[in-house]
Image (cartoon, rainbow, N blue to C red):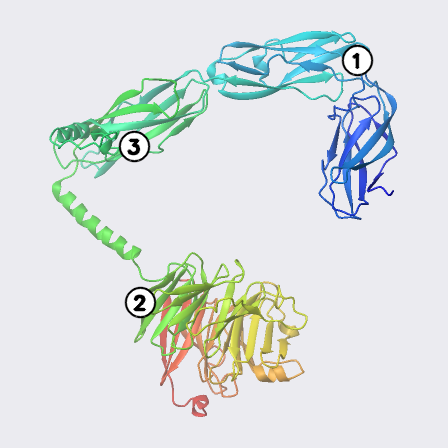
Amino acid sequence: MLKSISSELSESVLQFAPGGDPVSFDITVYNSSDQFASFQVALVAAGADANQRGWYRLSPSVSAKIPPGDQTQFKAHILSAPPVPGGFTGSMNLTARVYSTELRDEDRKDLRLIITGEGLLAPKITLPKKKFKAHPQEQIEVRAKIYNPNRKSLEVVLELAGLESTWLPEGVQKSLTLAPSQEKEVLFPCELPSPPQAPSGVYPFSLKILQPEVSSPSPQLLLEVFPKGFVEFQCDPLEQWLPENPNRWFNPRHGSTEYTLTFDNQSNVRLAGTVSVVDEAEEEARQKQRQFRLPLRIKPGSDDSVEEADAVKLPDGVTLDSPQVFMEPGESGDLTLTVHKRLPWFGWARQKRLQVEASLVDAQLDLRNEDETLELNILPVIPVWLQLLAGLAGLCLIGALWILLTQRGHTKAVHTVQFNGAGTEAVSGSSDQTIRRWRVRQNRLEPKGVVDRGDEAVRVIQYRPVNNNWVAAGLENGVIQVRSLLNEDDGSLVRMKDDRVFDLAFDQDARTLWSAHGSGLVLNWALTPNSRLSRGDNPQPIRLEGMDPDKGFGFALSAITLGGSADNLLAVGGRYQKLVLLDLISGRFSPVVRSARIGTQTEYINSLEIAEEQPTLLAAGDTQGFVSLWNMEACLSSAATCEPLDEWLAHGGDAVRSVALSSDGCYLVSAGDDGRVRLWFLTRAGKRSVTWEDRDTGQVLRRSKQAVNAVDILQRENQLLIVSGGDDRKVRLNRVRLRDSNQCRANR
């Protein structure tokens, strides 16, 4: 009959030196049965007590269930010599017994264990008492019985470890000689010092065998030290003047002075102290009010009282630097009591008396001098007319603070701006985690309120193309927030948290939303007509031949735009100055690679834009400072390297953060790190106008000392509207009147 368990040992002979490092070997177990089973291993040494297993360790102790035909492995560590009575040196048989409770079978394998050295057994320690309790300045005695199980005499050195050596007047070590099979008692007297030197708590300690050098467990003991001692409370000084250094003519309107409240902890407990402060005059007035107050009706069984109805608080003008002070045993802790008072208009010096009562938090120890009386002498200093003038100045200051605190703009850098289709409104998003709405009023923007206030920075925002009645915002944490502009409805689209959304693009009927992410993914969100994600639908990432579905395009994306007559042309850009053009219908795609413009990992294409009436004209702005114009259809249909229609350094070499095209493609506006917003005139062929006098520098519309991060353009009749936002937290509007001589517009 075939055995259901078989095993192998990694070693056939093993040498072990007692007191030295552990030795180990591997046990491989094979499941030769026809069922799942778990296995265990036990080591058996010839002549040793089978019930004692502390001389070795197995890992794991029990294996997981493994299928038929599979194998598992154990690691056996020999920690000390097998417990053979009287000790042993030389060679012995060691049997590894492998068994399974499920299979009810076992297998045994032997190896030779060679034990070197003297082969001594560890002395046995017996403790009549393992837990001790005492107060500081008391004495305890730790007793132990030591037995020699060997066949020859032993010189034994014991050490009491874990307690302060100064607590043991006879030392931490004891030496004794034990004849074979002899037992002796050892005594360690322990004297606890004064409370500050003996902190209250539980002290674990152990009794170790230092000699002979054999492996032996150290018995564990506990000493519990009870709380004892007192705390001294005092105040310094007891009397102060306000102001502390009076002026010759006029004293300041307000003054402050300090008292130091000291807790001196002469106990062995870590304590927390606190104080209550009562103004004697205020307390007397409160007591008089209570005499005329109707008694409160107390429900039967209730512990409420009139005193509990008054909230405990510090008097007006009195503050503490901390509600509590913590003190280690033997140390002092200070609280600073500060009194702020407005000086009286006129009259003699006025005196205030403060009653200070100290207490300990959750401690039943003696607190000495817990009540102190502090005196404060307040001098008169300022005339009435000056006080009235100061009050008026205070009102003006409050008004100015109210205006600052209720300002109606962004408080951090603006990352995105966009007009609605009619050019009557604009929206903006910022690092201050808000989406704000603006009304276009002639040459300025009028705040219309906060559309949404979240908990993440807003990276990009887009109006819904149909009706412009809601917006979609891409957030720093990878969530796309959908927000209605008509009511409080909102929703969110998210595929994976912390995958930052850098750009968004809608198709013309607003049924599809495209998002570009820092992971390199471009996601396609299917939307219902009511602007919400269809239930059960998941975003579909763009998949190209050879593309990793989890990494997308393989580089961090920062810009995306959708064009073509049927919304079939998609352009994505990002890290390394990479630009990829894709036909969503035919599946054609073209990575635009230009050896002269390959970027580093810190250089990006920051912005992409397609003209509405020229759906194949693409504008791009990048970190290297270039603005480039492309024919997307030509690039997708050409097998050769695609070259831009026009390309130039737009902001003096500084990074271009945003570009936008007018709907007819005749005007381009750019924004960059130089703090400028520039307008560029284009020809029908998608190039800068040759006859335009500002062809190389552009028409500067805005100057700022900080970078401009976002820009949008809208053409309305004979003028252009340009909205921009940047690191200066401002959202600004520019109007530009158009000239009839523009050849590009004349050819439309």
Q: Name the mark on residue 448.
A: 2
Amino acid identity at mark 1: Asn
The crowding category of the residue bearing disc 1, from other C-alpha atoms within 10 Å (few below 14, some 14 to 19, many at least 20), is: many
In the rendered image, the vertical position of residue 538 relative to residue 94, given as above or below? below
Q: Name the residue under label 3.
A: 338
Amino acid identity at mark 2: Lys
Amino acid identity at mark 3: Thr
Q: Are marks 3 and 2 in contact (CB under 8 Å)?
A: no
Q: Is mark 1 on a helix, strand or loop?
A: loop
Q: Distance between the residues labelled 3 and 1?
A: 73 Å
The crowding category of the residue bearing disc 2, from other C-alpha atoms within 10 Å (few below 14, some 14 to 19, many at least 20), is: some
Q: Distance between the residues labelled 3 and 2?
A: 46 Å
Counting residues from the start of the chain, the first of labels 3 and 2 encountered is: 3
Looking at the picture, tell me which residue is in the foreground, 176 or 263. Answer: 176
- Please give the count of numbered marks on the rendered protein: 3
Closer to the observer: label 3 or label 2? 2
Q: In which quarter of the image is residue 624?
A: bottom right
In the rendered image, the vertical position of residue 703 relative to residue 340, given as above or below? below
Q: Where is residue 96 in the image (x, y as percent from the top left)?
A: 82, 33
Q: Can residue 675 be seen in this view?
A: no
Q: Do the residues labelled 2 and 1 touch (CB within 8 Å)?
A: no
- Residue pictured at 43% horizontal, 59% vertical: 431
